[in-house]
Amino acid sequence: MKIFSGIQPTGDKHLGNYIGGFRQYARTQELGDAFFCIVDLHSITVDYDPRDLHDRTLDLFAMLIATGLDPQRSTVFAQSHVTAHAEASWLLSAVTSYGQLGRMTQFKDKADQREFVSAGLYTYPVLMAGDILLYQTDRVPIGDDQRQHLELARDVAQRFNARFGKTFVVPEGIYPEIGARIMDLQEPTKKMSTTGGTEQGTVKLLEEPDAIRKKFRSAVTDSGREIRRAADKPGVTNLVDILSVATDRSPGDVEQAYDGQGYGDLKRDVGDAVVELLAPVRERYLELRSNEPELLRLLATGAEKARAASTPTLEAMYERMGFVTLS
């Protein structure tokens, strides 16, 4: 089985990234031949600082390893180091409709927030489709917010296969059963985010333990006192889901454990559990990030493996689309 997923090196990584992404990556790498990509080309579709992109790419690579990816077992690499990704994106744009891209929810949300909207912001779902399809991916571990992008990749694969002959595996998603979407602690109807969320409601992976505990103590809850997951209790539902993941218990077990207790007890215990969960991640990250030459060596190894794996698919695309090949 082939596994692929990618994550952008933008913004400080937070608890939602860990629960919906990093934790899944470490588990799914055990399922087969796994590829995990730092999608740095996606990061230039909005205003950015070049130095920041450089540093955050290395930060993210260290974080991926710190949260459980094994670069000996999985192929972990930066998208810009494998030119097949940019080439595949252009080729796949021929089988992606203008209307499909215009309906992408994330594009509409981001475009509404900016005066200047780059063409890349509109077309980057095609690049994402290429990221996935180049590796003949069977399964894609992603968060719930990426369902629409994966559906586009599936549509593009099916359209290419129908027009040019069977070339791509049509991938399927793997979504977390619990914690597919971790919400902002201050605005629990909105996804936790370092770019669109609140500062006090976003738990960053590298924050000091006391700062993490403080954020959970001040988390917004709901009317009433009953601790249960429900559509009308988004704050409590979010806390129960986080504690469920952090302590490896089912949400039902968490609810039962807090029967008759107040929100204060729950918030205290969630904060403590998250601190304990993230402590080894923070320690390992700092160790890795202090050795940049080793990070670059591992990145180069990952890029070499990814080039070898993606080349046969790219060559097949060129050939089946009618381009003259020289070998």
Image (spheres, helix red, strand yellow):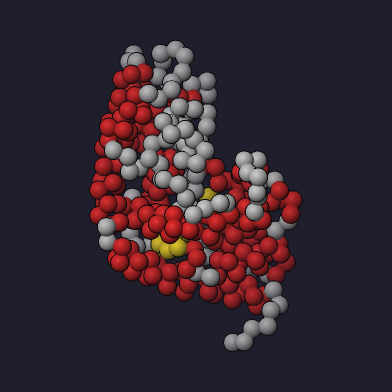
Quadrant (top left, top right, bottom left, bottom right) of the C terminus: bottom right
Horizontally, residue 137 falls left or right of residue 219, namely right
Q: Position of residue 55 (x, y in %)?
A: 40, 57
Name the foreground residue: 28 vs 214. Answer: 214
Q: Is residue 196 above or below residue 1?
A: above
Residue depicted at 52% across the width and 38% down the height = 196
Q: How many marks?
A: 0
Quarter assignment of residue 256 = top left
Q: Position of residue 223 (x, y in %)?
A: 47, 14
Residue depicted at 27% across the width and 32% down the height = 210
Q: Position of residue 309 (x, y in %)?
A: 48, 71
Q: Is residue 241 visible?
A: no
Name the foreground residue: 127 vs 291. Answer: 291
Q: Is residue 225 visible?
A: yes
Quarter assignment of residue 267 = top left
Horizontally, residue 205 falls left or right of residue 134, namely left
Q: Position of residue 203 (x, y in %)?
A: 38, 36
Residue depicted at 32% across the width and 33% down the height = 212
Quarter assignment of residue 208 = top left
Q: Is residue 265 above or below residue 299?
A: above
Name the foreground residue: 146 vs 15. Answer: 15
Horizontally, residue 215 falls left or right of residue 128, namely left
Residue depicted at 49% across the width and 63% down the height = 79
Q: Is residue 221 above or below residue 18?
A: above
